Amino acid sequence: MTDVLVKVGFLALAALNGAVIFTIMDVKGASWMQRRPGPLHVGLRGFIFPLAEILKFVQKEDIIPTEVDRPVFKWAPAYVMVSCVALFAVVPMSPTLVVADLELGVFFVLAISSLGTIGVLTAGWSSANKYSLMGGLRAAGQLIAYELPLILAVVGVVIQAETMSLVGIVEKQIEWGVPFVVGGQVVGFLIFMVAATAEMMRVPFDMPIGESELTMGFMTEYSGIRFLIFYISEYMNMFILCAIASTLFLGGYHVPLLPTEWVNFYGPVVLLTKTVILGFILVAVRWSQPRFREDQLQNLAWKILIPASLINILVTAIMKVGF
Amino acid sequence: MVNTLDPQNFNNFSEASVSVEIETEDMTLNIGPQHPSTHGVLRLVAKVDGEKVYDVKPVLGYMHRGYEKLAEVRSYPQITTLVNRIDWVAGFSNEIPFIAGAERLMEIEVPERAKHIRLILTEMARISSHFVFNGAYALEVGALTPIFYAMEDRERVLDLIESVTGGRFHPNFNRIGGVKPAAGSGPTTKKDIQDLPAGFYRDTKVAMQKVIEAADQFQNLIGGNEVFKKRTKNVGILTAETAEAFGVSGPILRASGVKSDLRTLTDYLPYDQFEYDIPVGENGDCYDRWDVRVKEMVESAKIVLQAIDSMPSGPLQAKVPKVIKVPKGRTYVRAENPKGEMGYYIVSDGGLGPYRLKVRTASFSNISILPLLLEGALLPDLIAIMGSLDFVLGDVDR
Amino acid sequence: MEEFLSKINENFINTDVEFETINIKVDSSQWVETHQKLKDEFDLKFFSWLSAIDWDNEVSIGEAPKESVSPSFEIITCLSNVSNNNLVTVSTTISKLEPKITSLVEIYAGANWHEREAYEMFGINFENHPNLEKLYLPDGYEGNPMLKSFELISREVKPWPGEVDVEGMPEEPESDESVDG
């Protein structure tokens, strides 16, 4: 019983901390690129920003418009958050420091992360607002379309690693000596990052939010803590997808030259570093690119990414069987 | 009630047919007066089907202030104050055609130095307006960063305008016969003629160099960006004949391929002494409209640099009577506002104020093509097209 | 500009040049043909604006005309050419009791919104206009604001103070009197 409680507590802590780290990185990166001095200097060199955000949202009034579908409206943020937090359970920080080392780790990740789609769609539909509806429908189309390249890119890794458990994949990379991104999965890595950016609904794929057209899209009618839940789960999603990418492609908690007895100590640090590096690339892309139009986005998914990932699987399978 | 289990009724049922038609209605979306992307309180009632827009009806008048009626109760210097609030982004350039019209009716010769100062300030207003366009258009397409760079570069130009005129957006610097000759009131300063402030030439040269660099940066960062090109190329194509028939002027007309610039056709400002290009687009799509404006910024900066080097000396205002009464007559004066052609039709009866002042604004005619351009466009394209027309609601609604 | 002016003088009867603006006066029955001719033969394809002037002897705001005029509406359009400096204004007079005139939408598509504005501001009826309804004013607004008889309410409360605070020329002493308009 106590170890279940410990694990649950760890999940909550890890999720919130991950969100906080990425919030700070996003805002500081934004203000550095946009030459705004505020979040770089004000308030403990800008690190007080997440606390200020959370306090601000917590003290706001919880406005629920009269014509919404009440139970659906209230529970939609919960779907999105659950689908993000549950992913923290399978990412390993060392061979033993993992909440649950499932045999079907990768399968679990992909299945749970697609639950978020329901949350987004119901949020858009239940707010009695045409703009939210359009945001929700765009989100449904986009998220479903980009699930496929995500899954297919990961299939290449699974073929190469011969196991679906995340610890097993990292062990396989240790055995090979090079992380998978160098050892043949470069195309898979790129496809995964692009599809993950679309799954997180970040610019350049933020059509569902579409801030200058739909004024927050499916999140328009949410205020106060409910909006905070959406906001935090967006950053949690970003953190965990970057962590999964670094586990699958970059070698996870392993660094070649350090001794393996101390892996329980340096494992989390290494994983965090790799996650933050990937996250920084995403931040830089967000603040410098315009957003795609909906049909261009779907074009990219169906006509470019899916064929590329299928070819990737083919090549990986041939290499695996032949050599 | 027919008993369906009775075999006698079976023959009747074979003729009955059930047809189910799912009727779908188009959704009427109110891109309302409050929206992040309409530049002000413009309301579009759009019929959309999914993402496709079928019919757009603009509803104007949320900012109608009644300039033409107000102008009938004011004297000419008072109207100058009123008039630079029409297009509030480029405040100085709204006063110029009105003052030029009054001077034409009074047949006053404006001194050369005043004309040069007016030209410099007009071009600075043009640069300021195009910076706002650059930043805001990138924001509407989705790039969140360029607006900060645009605003920062624009601050330098606004500081220059403020150091000369005292106001950033509404300078109210023109007087009938020239520009404002004296600054301040009070016993010691009213006799001083305040001219351009010290350090103006040096600061302007620095600022204009930075404008040229900034425009270059925008061309690379935004114009070379693949996503931006995909969002704006071949979107919202406007042909030259349609543009002329609707009265569309300014950068939009030039982007459709018509080489027409009112600065070459008017003579009350000395544009013929300077060398500048007139950028013209090819296709008439949103990318060309953006491109033309960025190139115009560079040309304006070049004009200002040339004007500063060749500034004549002399008085700042011609001799006019203390109480200005404009003789009877009527005239139409037009100018190249940053947004298009702006003109004033003054009908004067010899009194203190005009009998009728008709304000012809650029954005009013520019957005009359919206229902035509937006047919069959997708919703994100609607935002991109509206942003590329670069209108301001004060200009539309007067 | 000179040959353009002479060509205009040949083709139309009632033209004059006032302060560098060419004005052609026509009868309201020839409104449409004049514009068609100007568009086709004179290459004036740019439709600048259309508006109206309310000539009346009793005005509620501002000043009445110095010489008495017969009450009428004068409708003015402005056409120009984009490549050179050719610009004409065409004006016609219609009566105030039955203000109507044919619409120009068939010839110049841009006349649509200008005529709607003239309709709501002056009450002029444009025949054959596709959708003659209010442009600026809210629904249920009564009256036509630009008529000279329409009162400006703020001036009812406080009359126009005239020219105040006249700023003196730099060489002359400043005067403190306010001149009444």
Image: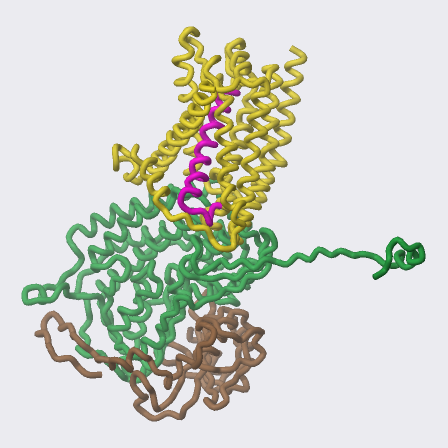
Colour that chain A carries in the picture: yellow
Q: Is residue A265 magenta?
A: no
Q: Residue at x 38, y 75 (%)?
A: B358
**Can you see residue B229?**
no
Q: Residue at x 17, y 77 (%)?
A: B322
Q: Is residue A224 magenta?
A: yes
Q: Position of residue C57 (x, y in %)?
A: 35, 91
Tell me the quadrant of the picture where the C terminus of chain B can be found. Answer: bottom left
Q: Position of residue B338 (x, y in %)?
A: 38, 59
Q: As displayed, is residue B372 above or below residue B221? A: below
B323 sits left or right of B289 in the view: left
**Can you see residue B340?**
yes
Colour that chain B carries in the picture: green
Q: Position of residue A112 (x, y in %)?
A: 56, 30
A111 sits left or right of C62 in the view: right
- Looking at the colours in the rendered structure, which chain would you say is drawn in brown? C
Q: Position of residue B106 (x, y in %)?
A: 27, 78
Q: Nearer the viewer, residue C25 or B93?
A: B93
In magenta, the rendered stretch is A219-248
Tell me the quadrant of the picture where the N terminus of chain B can be found. Answer: bottom right
Q: Residue furthest left?
A: B188
Q: Residue at x 55, y 45 (%)?
A: A136
Q: Quadrant of residue B115?
A: bottom left
Q: From the image, give the main secondary structure of the stretch colored magenta.
A: helix
